[in-house]
Image: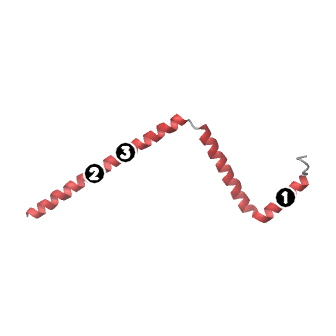
Amino acid sequence: MLGGISIWQLLIVFVIVILIFGTKKLRNLGGDLGGAVKGFKNAINEDPKKTDDEKDAAQQASLAHEEKDATFDSTVEKQDASESKNQDNK
């Protein structure tokens, strides 16, 4: 026995909970709880050094992409400026 609670009492409480909340809400609640536990386990098992290395690599890739865009933008601006000067001279 669980502290004086019989299986029949637990069954009655379970039926009342299903009647109040419905099976869809209980299914969603179970899925959310399972996802949270899975995420927690993944966070515990991850190697912190590996995560830091991945973050550094992502930052470097982002910076390289931004520099490439900045170079392309400045090249386009220079071309536009030279074209407008050529048109002004004509």
Residue at 27%, 49% (x, y): give it: 71
Sequence-first tag of 1 and 3: 1
Residue at 20%, 54% (x, y): give it: 78
Residue type, mark 2 in image: Phe
Q: Nearer the viewer, residue 4 or 15?
A: 4
Residue at disc 3, secondary structure: helix
**Image location of residue 35, percent across then percent down:** 65, 50
Quarter of the image with the C terminus in it: bottom left
Residue at disc 1, secondary structure: helix
Residue type, mark 1 in image: Val
Residue at disc 2, secondary structure: helix
Question: Which residue is outermost to the front?
Answer: 3
Sequence-first tag of 3 and 2: 3
In contact (CB < 8 Å): disc 1 and disc 3 = no
Instruction: Measure how far apart labels 3 and 2 are at the Cα level.
Output: 14 Å
Residue at 80%, 61% (x, y): give it: 17
Q: Which residue is mark 2?
A: 72
Q: How many marks?
A: 3
Above or below for 51 versus 80: above
Q: Quadrant of residue 57?
A: top left
Q: Which residue is mark 3?
A: 63
Residue at 54%, 36% (x, y): give it: 48
**Image location of residue 5, percent across then percent down:** 90, 51
In contact (CB < 8 Å): disc 2 and disc 1 = no
**Image location of residue 1, percent across then percent down:** 91, 46
